[in-house]
Image (spheres, rainbow, N blue to C red):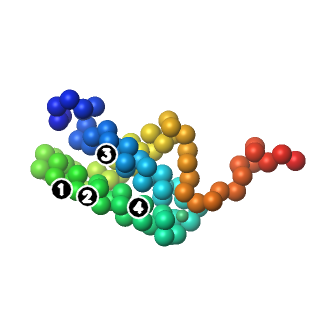
């Protein structure tokens, strides 16, 4: 849509940044810890700005919650491609425990 980049409303660098923040709260074992809450707040701050500046003017019928869940889905796909990273301290996965 905007000339030159990978084609979406959200640029590649924005997506990279959003995905980094997304990893910081999505799937957290303790989503209410300060780190997760900060990551989530930062994620939505960026998203809301993009929404107000570029989504709402172009797509009147897409409301923020739709845009946010769409973006989360994209981030989730990127995370699964780049490998998971979870914000909270994780217990070792069962297959990493050697008995
Ligand atoms: Zn947490």
Does the CB distance between marks 1 and 2 fall below 8 Å?
Answer: yes
**Which residue appears farthest toward the right when viewing the image?**
99
Upstream in sequence: badge 3 or badge 2: 3
Upstream in sequence: badge 4 or badge 2: 4
Q: CA distance from mark 1 to mark 2?
A: 6 Å
> Pointer 2: what residue?
48
**Which residue appears farthest toward the top when viewing the image?**
4
> Pointer 3: what residue?
14
Q: Nearer the viewer, residue 67 or 96?
A: 96
Upstream in sequence: badge 4 or badge 1: 4
The quadrant of the rendering that contains the N terminus is top left
Name the element at disc 2: helix
In the rendered image, which quarter is residue 12 located in?
A: top left
Upstream in sequence: badge 3 or badge 4: 3
Q: Position of residue 27 (x, y in %)?
A: 53, 55
Q: CA distance from mark 3 to mark 1?
A: 15 Å
Numbered mark located on residue 52 in the image: 1
Q: CA distance from mark 4 to mark 1?
A: 18 Å
Numbered mark located on residue 40 in the image: 4
Q: Position of residue 11 (x, y in %)?
A: 27, 40
For the point 70% across and 56% down, the residue is 91
Answer with left or right where residue 34 lies relative to residue 94: left
Q: Position of residue 16 (x, y in %)?
A: 38, 43
**Which residue appears farthest toward the left when viewing the image?**
57
Does the CB distance between marks 3 and 2 fall below 8 Å?
Answer: no
Mark 1 closeness class: few <14, some 14–19, many ≥20 residues within 10 Å: few
Numbered mark located on residue 29 in the image: none
In the rendered image, which quarter is residue 77 located in?
A: top left
């Amino acid at each position: 849509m905007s000339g030159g980049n990978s084609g979406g409303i959200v640029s590649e660098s924005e997506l990279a940044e959003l995905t980094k923040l997304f990893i910081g709260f999505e799937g957290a074992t303790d989503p209410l810890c300060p780190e997760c809450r900060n990551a989530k707040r930062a994620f939505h701050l960026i998203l809301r700005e993009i929404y107000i500046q570029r989504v709402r003017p172009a797509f009147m019928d897409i409301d923020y919650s739709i845009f946010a869940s769409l973006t989360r889905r994209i981030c989730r796909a990127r995370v699964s491609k780049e490998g998971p990273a979870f914000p909270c301290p994780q217990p070792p996965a069962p297959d990493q425990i050697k008995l």
